[in-house]
C-alpha cells in the first residue's frame, strides 16, 4: 500500500506542477485598448486640433484649430481660423497632440466616432493632414 500511495502522490505532484507552470506562463493583457467607440465627445477635449473634413457640419470650433475642408454648411464657422479648402478630401477626423477622433459622418458634435491613441494610426493621419494641408488652397478672407 505504501508503494501505491507514493506513486499516486508523484503523479498528482507532476500534474500539479505542470498546471502551475502552464498557468504561470500565460500572459495577461491588462493594458487599455488603443481605440474605443464614442458617441459623446467635444472638440474641446482635443489639444491643438487639426481637422480634416470631407463635410463639416455646424459646431463651435476653437480658434486655434487648423482645418482642411471639402464641403461645409456655414462659412461663418471658420472666422478667425486657419482654414484651407481641398476638393480631394475623403474622410472626417480630428487630430490632437496625443489622440485622434475618427468620425463616421460629417463633423458635428456628438457624432458617432472612434477615439484612438495608436501611434501607427496617428502617424498616418498626421501625414494625411500635412499632405492635404500643403495641397489645399487658403480660404479667401472675404469668405471667412
Image (cartoon, grey):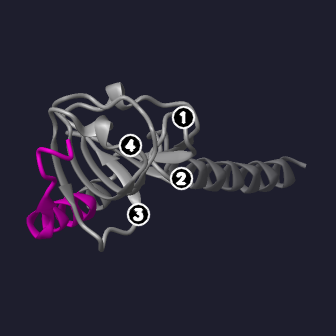
Give the foreground label among 1 and 4.
4
Q: Is residue 45 above or below residue 13?
A: above
Q: Magenta span covers which residues?
A: 123-144
Q: How many C-alpha atoms fall within 10 Å of the one at disc 1: few (<14), some, or many (≥20)?
A: few
The residue to which callout 3 is attached is 91
Give the foreground label among 4 and 2.
4
Residue 58's x, y, as percent? Answer: 45, 38
How far apart are the two marked residues, 1 and 4, measured between alpha carbons?
18 Å
The residue to which callout 4 is attached is 74
Residue found at the very far bottom of the displayed protein:
88
Dot 3 and dot 1 residues touching (CB under 8 Å): no
Residue found at the very far right of the displayed protein:
1
Q: Is residue 41 visible?
A: yes
Sequence-earlier tag: 2 or 1? 2
Which of the 4 image quarters holds residue 64?
top left
- In the rendered structure, find residue 26 and report the number of the disc placed on it: 2
Q: Number of callouts in the render?
A: 4
Give the foreground label among 4 and 3.
4
The residue to which callout 1 is attached is 110
- Taking the spot 24% from the left edge, 66% from the top edge, the residue there is 86
Residue 15's x, y, as percent? Answer: 70, 55
Sequence-earlier tag: 1 or 4? 4
Give the foreground label among 2 and 1.
1
How far apart are the two marked residues, 3 and 1, measured between alpha carbons?
17 Å
How far apart are the two marked residues, 2 and 1, measured between alpha carbons?
40 Å
How far apart are the two marked residues, 4 and 2, measured between alpha carbons?
55 Å
In what element is the residue under mark 3?
A: loop
Sequence-earlier tag: 4 or 2? 2
In what element is the residue under mark 4?
A: loop
Sequence-earlier tag: 4 or 3? 4
Amino acid at each position: 500500500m505504501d508503494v501505491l500511495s507514493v506513486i499516486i502522490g508523484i503523479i498528482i505532484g507532476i500534474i500539479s506542477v505542470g498546471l502551475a507552470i502552464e498557468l504561470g506562463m500565460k500572459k495577461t493583457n491588462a493594458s487599455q485598448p488603443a481605440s474605443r467607440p464614442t458617441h459623446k465627445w467635444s472638440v474641446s477635449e482635443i489639444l491643438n486640433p487639426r481637422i480634416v473634413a470631407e463635410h463639416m457640419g455646424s459646431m463651435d470650433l476653437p480658434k486655434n484649430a487648423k482645418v482642411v475642408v471639402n464641403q461645409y454648411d456655414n462659412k461663418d464657422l471658420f472666422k478667425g481660423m486657419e482654414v484651407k479648402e481641398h476638393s480631394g478630401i475623403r474622410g472626417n477626423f480630428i487630430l490632437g497632440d496625443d489622440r485622434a477622433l475618427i468620425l463616421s459622418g460629417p463633423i458635428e458634435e456628438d457624432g458617432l466616432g472612434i477615439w484612438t491613441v495608436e501611434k501607427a494610426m496617428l502617424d498616418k493621419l498626421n501625414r494625411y493632414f500635412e499632405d492635404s494641408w500643403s495641397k489645399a488652397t487658403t480660404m479667401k478672407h472675404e469668405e471667412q
